[in-house]
Amino acid sequence: MVMENKTNIVIKIITVFYICSILGYIYELILCFFYTGKLFSHGILNGPWLPIYGTGAVLIMCLQKFKSHPLIIFFLSFFLTGILEGLAGFCLLKFFKKRLWDYTGYFLNIKGFVCFLSAFCFGIGGLLVTYLIVPFVNKIIEKINKKYLITVLSIISLIFTGDIIATILK
């Protein structure tokens, strides 16, 4: 097996983070529209991203050694992202005084921060990250000029960092 160079690994991690943060934002828009009939933005940031999804995807990338075992990927994703969601919900409430989701009343919920259904969906998401998104990002990294890709990721990172700073300041 050929070792990836460090630049490709960093590019892959950052690319997966942003793609999944944006896909998470779109997923939540669709999900909330399905339940409420209204489109509205979630999260505390202003941009079209939910970094909890990107963070979960990066965690799932650490499971690539289990790629030949989809059930292991599913269950580890289920638990890892469930823990992440619970911690994020708790921290958002504690530090920003915001509860962005509440699973109270859902099956196997833990203080409304996480429930079986959300963890199950994230388990499915772990499969999507492992078998669709990471291979897609690998193809992007192979085909696109590294300098161009680094420039695009740098610009997105500046905008994302500005969004975080603006959120903290308000």
Image (tube, rainbow, N blue to C red):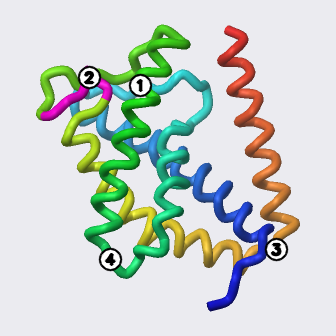
Dots 4 and 2: beta carbons under 8 Å?
no
Q: Could you tell me how far apart the alpha carbons at marks 2 and 1 are, in whole angstroms?
A: 9 Å
Q: Which residue is mark 1?
A: 89
Residue 76 at x, y = what percent? 34, 58
In x, y percent, where is residue 79?
32, 49
Mark 4 secondary-structure assignment? loop
Magenta-span inclusion, residue 102: no
Marks 2 and 1 close (CB-CB < 8 Å): yes
Residue placed under numbered mark 2 in the picture: 112
Asked if 16 appears above or below 35 in the picture, the reply is below
Q: Is residue 149 above or below residue 167?
A: below
Which quadrant of the figure contains the C terminus?
top right
Image location (x, y in percent) of residue 87: 43, 30
30 and 81: which one is in front?
81
Q: Which residue is mark 4?
A: 69
SS at badge 2: loop
Q: Which comes sooner in the sequence, label 1 or label 4? A: 4
Mark 1 Cα-neighbour bin, 10 Å: few <14, some 14–19, many ≥20 = many
Q: Residue furthest bottom?
A: 1
At label 3, which amino acid type do we have? Asn
Distance in Å between CA atoms under marks 1 and 4 = 30 Å
Residue on which the image places disc 3: 145
Q: Which residues are magenta?
A: 108-113
Instruction: Name which quarter of the figure residue 130 lies in.
Output: bottom left
Precedes in sequence: disc 3 or disc 4: 4
Alpha carbon separation for disc pair 3 and 4: 33 Å
The amino acid sitting under disc 2 is Gly
State the residue at coordinates (20%, 42%): 117
Label 3: element kind: loop
| Of the pair 76 and 118, the residue shown nearer to us | 76
